[in-house]
Amino acid sequence: MNTETLVEAPPKKRFSGLQVLGLVLLAIVITVLITAFVIKKYLWPSEFRPVELNQKEEQVLQGKLEAIGLDADVVMVGDQPLVAEPYSEAGASRDVYFGERELNALVARNTSMANRLAIDLSDDLASAKMLIPVPEDFPIMSGQTVRVTAGVEMAFENNRPIVILKGVSLMGVPIPNAWLGNLKNVDLVQQFGGNDGFWKTFSDGVELIEVTDGRLHVKLRE
């Protein structure tokens, strides 16, 4: 005669009332922290830290500005006397190079934009992060500052520059293409360069444009 041994299944482990209460409180705390982070980052974003060049970097930037006819001291102060001299293009370079730090340092010299605009350069992509104040008479979020980011593809193909808007985000949320006038992923030079205007003039004057990680190179036509 076979005898079967019945093994009782161990009772299922249940959470006690205190454990359930603890999990609920933990979920509430995490939610509050995430909400506070989102509000701080997008509704009350902190200002950007302006880029400050060291003495050597400042001298290099000054040389680049002078090479394209911009004296930073004259532009900023405006009280230096101009010295007349004969015009000549002999030996003049048509290549313009700017590093990411240099561009942000130039932005920092504009006191109104110093803490509100930051530029990032990566391969074929120029990105900008901006803090934009909402007007006091705006129906929502009046008086607040919102974070806006944008990306533009910049390259040179088929003997012409390419400028493509990759997108714009408001407080981390991508803006619909329809709200951007259906210009997202559109080559602005190809779209608008056929008629007289800014984009045609821009295209006709550029022989090369190259954006790499941390660097912008533009070569102008004769």
Image: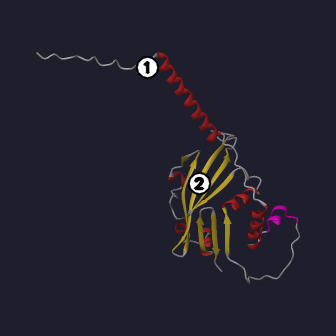
Q: Is residue 208 above or below residue 214?
A: below
Q: Tag 1: Cα neighbours inside 10 Å, few (<14), some, or many (≥20)?
A: few
Q: Position of residue 61 (x, y in %)?
A: 74, 66
Q: Is residue 83 left or right of residue 9?
A: right
Q: Position of residue 119 (x, y in %)?
A: 65, 57
Q: Tag 2's secondary structure?
A: strand
Q: Residue at 81% across / 61% down in the picture? A: 76
| Amino acid marked by disc 1 | Phe
Question: Which residue carries the number 1 mark?
Answer: 15
Q: Earlier in the sequence, mark 2 or mark 1?
A: 1
Q: Is residue 133 left or right of residue 4?
A: right
Magenta stretch? 71-79
Q: Position of residue 127 (x, y in %)?
A: 60, 57
Q: Position of residue 125 (x, y in %)?
A: 57, 61
Q: Quadrant of the N terminus?
A: top left
Question: Which residue carries the number 2 mark?
Answer: 150
Q: Residue at 84% across / 80% down in the picture? A: 85
